[in-house]
Image: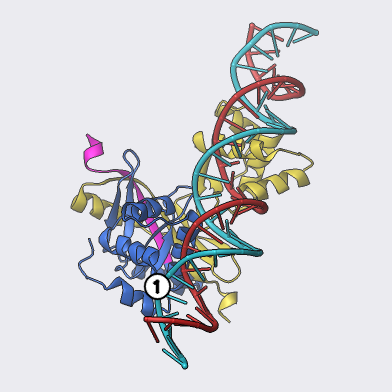
Chain colours: A yellow, B blue, C cyan, D red
Amino acid sequence: MNTRQHNCKEELQETELRATPARIAAMRYFEQTDKPADVQMLKTYLHKQKIKADSATVFRIVNTFTQKGLTKQIQLNENKFRYELADKIDHHHFICDNCGTIEDISDCNIEAIEKEINQKKGLLIKRHRLEFFGLCKSCQR
Amino acid sequence: MNTRQHNCKEELQETELRATPARIAAMRYFEQTDKPADVQMLKTYLHKQKIKADSATVFRIVNTFTQKGLTKQIQLNENKFRYELADKIDHHHFICDNCGTIEDISDCNIEAIEKEINQKKGLLIKRHRLEFFGLCKSCQR
DNA sequence: TTATAGATGCAAGCGTATTGCATGTAGTAT
DNA sequence: ATACTACATGCAATACGCTTGCATCTATAA
């Protein structure tokens, strides 16, 4: 659920990317759902929007989006990448072992931990990835 | 650096796995180094130990190890899996963007965060994965 | 409207990971 | 020590994610 309403076309032009139908629709996907998408999901979504795009194209789209900082690449213990908007406030994911649901988690205050690591070990931390696995509310029954 | 000294053969037998040369050597790899290994690395290591093992076999070895709880599968933003001992005390990884060095990080106290999430959202968290990315000490210069 | 840099489709190709089947071997019983 | 059996391995085929080269198409700007 992304409350901001973007003009996908403008957003693409701001990053010097041509506003092609496939890219506009992909952008719209990311803004309308908070489920990190893999290439197959995106491709399917595009087809439903009457835009048929080759897998290679979809791979290229997510790669350029990521490179331009629009999206970011994440891994949820699958042997493929997923992508989600990069400008969402810093958050993490919870993945249900049973049903696979992905839920956003925020307010983790990892920054404090990063600061401590920097002081202790001298590592310059730029990014982090944090995922939780377990059982969601309904799968606990 | 793992200070405990295991008898790899016994350890395998305890898990009802046959102590074949390839498995014993793989086990030894995991206990002698703290670098999470991918299949290629393991295969190369085995060859250096005069044990030639097919890639399929190495994949099967890490999968059975992981299934039996000896190792665990991790992802470091590459399109492949790595494996490391499962019984190491809870820790995380730092990966240098520049040179690729992997460093262990511990004492992060994620448990407190997990407890909070459980109370707030009712999610039952069983595992987590946390990785940091940035520049290591020598690459900062 | 046209020109052109950039995007796409298609097919080939690479690397990781899995699987079926025949063969080899560790562990066990004799 | 020997033979048996269940399990492990090698090999080849296959699946899948992802990338790339090249010809074609198109969004953008002149």
Residue drawn at x 37%, y 78% as measured from the top left? B13
Residue B7 in the image: above or below residue A25: below
- Most foreground residue, B115 or C16: C16
Residue B20 in the image: above or below residue D29: below
Instruction: Determine the secondary structure under disc 1.
Output: helix
Q: Is residue B141 visible?
A: yes
Residue drawn at x 24%, y 37% as measured from the top left? B140
Whether residue A92 sits left or right of residue B103 in the image: it is right
Residue beneath disc 1: B115
Question: Is residue A66 within the magenta segment?
Answer: no
Q: In which quadrant is the C terminus of chain B drawn?
A: top left
Tally of numbered discs: 1
**Place of residue B89 in the rendered image (x, y in percent of width and height, measured from the top left):** 29, 68
Task: Answer few, some or many: residues within 10 Å of disc 1's Cα (few below 14, many 20 plus, some between 14 and 19).
Answer: some
Question: Which of the 4 image quarters holds residue B138?
Answer: top left
**Place of residue B110 in the rendered image (x, y in percent of width and height, measured from the top left):** 35, 65
Question: Which of the 4 image quarters holds residue B22?
Answer: bottom left
Residue drawn at x 31%, y 60% as measured from the top left? B29
Question: Is residue B129 within the magenta segment?
Answer: yes
The magenta region covers: B128-141
**Place of residue B57 in the rendered image (x, y in percent of width and height, measured from the top left):** 48, 60
Whether residue A53 sits left or right of residue B66 in the image: it is right
Residue A81 in the image: above or below residue A64: below
**Place of residue B62 in the rendered image (x, y in percent of width and height, measured from the top left):** 44, 63
